[in-house]
Amino acid sequence: MTSQQSHRKDEHVSLAEKFHQSANSSFDQVRILHQSLPELALSDVDSMTPFAGKQIAYPVMIEAMTGGSERTGQLNAQLAQLAAITHLPMAVGSQSVALKEPDLAETFSIVRHYNPTGMMIANIGAGHSVDDARKVVEMISADALQVHINAAQEIIMPEGDREFYWLDQLAAIVAKLDIPVIVKEVGFGMTAKTVQKLMSIGVKYVDLSGRGGTSFAKIENFRRPQKEMAYLDDWGLTTTESLLEMRKLSARPVIIASGGIKTPLDAIKALALGADVAGMAGEVLHHLITDDYSVTEDWLIHWLQDFKCLMLLTGSKTVKDLRKQSMVFSPELESFARQRFIS
Ligand code: FNR
């Protein structure tokens, strides 16, 4: 398992961790105003929510990251255990490497050994055929499929793709698969226009994956011998900007917000801004890499308990109530909203 592809998967993990601490989360640009009278008890708070045809325990998921090498297979096994113990949905990283090198399939399918019945989401790049999409779903007996759209990442990679005619293949995948299909970014965010285009071809689930957390611009620039596209390090919409963009839509898809979510408060803010589910990648990886598995498990269990406490503090008996918050934006975010005619 030492192919160039496997090496790249290992590098993504170590570089994501290298840049993790310095990321500037856009959730600092949003304040939820404190209300002193929650009129609730913790036992009243219900964090269950419907998502992709199932009920999930919290509106939170472990995002697509990895697989495709021995080390990342072990990480997938640990992520699957975390998802099983916390009942969170989990996505694996892009499985296209396993379509090219079938002996790498077990670095993904291992998740079912540790999490046989939980909600598991397959992942593939846009541009793949319906047949490939079916293969990756089958590989992990997935309940849903994420198709990632990563034009900015590919452009920064010298060996990356240079053709991005994606909509027809995406439409075919959405039409032919009988499980939910989520179209996701990889850290560059989405405008209302992008989401409108996706909805026009039948997409019902989007993962905005905005700037402010793991940066594939930084990761791929670091991997380049000449880092001449470093000026793209700040390319893209932040996660909070992407969420505000969704206010321009008259009809909305189901929205997953990822990109820079580290604390339960970040997730609460994402939901207050209109997300249906908050997704976390880099932060979970950071804990797994720097701590033992059991310490990471304790951290995530506490994280979810704190999430419920914050639902209480914000007077939210249900996940839907999180949408009713009074919020104040930083001057920068407020200016973005104004210039984009978002009320
Ligand atoms: C990712 N991400 C990702 N996304 C995807 O759709 N397919 C993939 O293969 C990967 N690979 C990957 C590797 C690593 C190491 C990381 C940290 C992330 C992107 C991920 O799902 C998420 O959208 C972004 O990382 C933003 O979330 P965070 O990391 O800021 O919480």
Image (cartoon, rainbow, N blue to C red):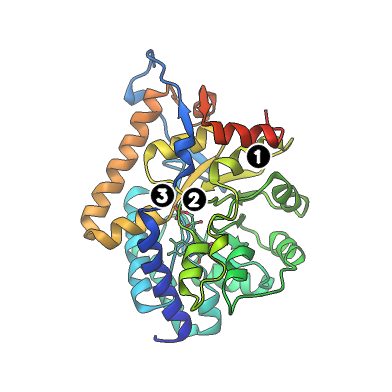
Helix, strand or loop at label 2? It is loop
Decide: is 158 above or below 263. Answer: below
Report, in whole angstroms, how far the alpha carbon at label 3 lies from the one at label 1: 25 Å
Dot 3, crowdedness within 10 Å: few (<14), some or many (≥20)?
some
Reading the image, the residue beneath label 3 is 88
Q: Earlier in the sequence, mark 1 or mark 2?
A: 1
The amino acid on which the numbered mark 2 sits, given as a three-letter code, is: Gly
Q: Nearer the viewer, residue 191 or 111?
A: 191
Q: Nearer the viewer, residue 126 or 139?
A: 126
Q: Earlier in the sequence, mark 3 or mark 1?
A: 3
User: Is the CB of the residue bearing disc 2 within 8 angstroms of ligand 1?
Assistant: yes
Dot 2, crowdedness within 10 Å: few (<14), some or many (≥20)?
many
Reading the image, the residue beneath label 2 is 259
Front label number (3 vs 1): 1
Report, in whole angstroms, how far the alpha carbon at label 1 lies from the one at label 2: 16 Å
Q: Is residue 48 visible?
A: no
Helix, strand or loop at label 1? It is helix
Name which quarter of the figure residue 111 lies in.
Answer: bottom left
Reading the image, the residue beneath label 1 is 246
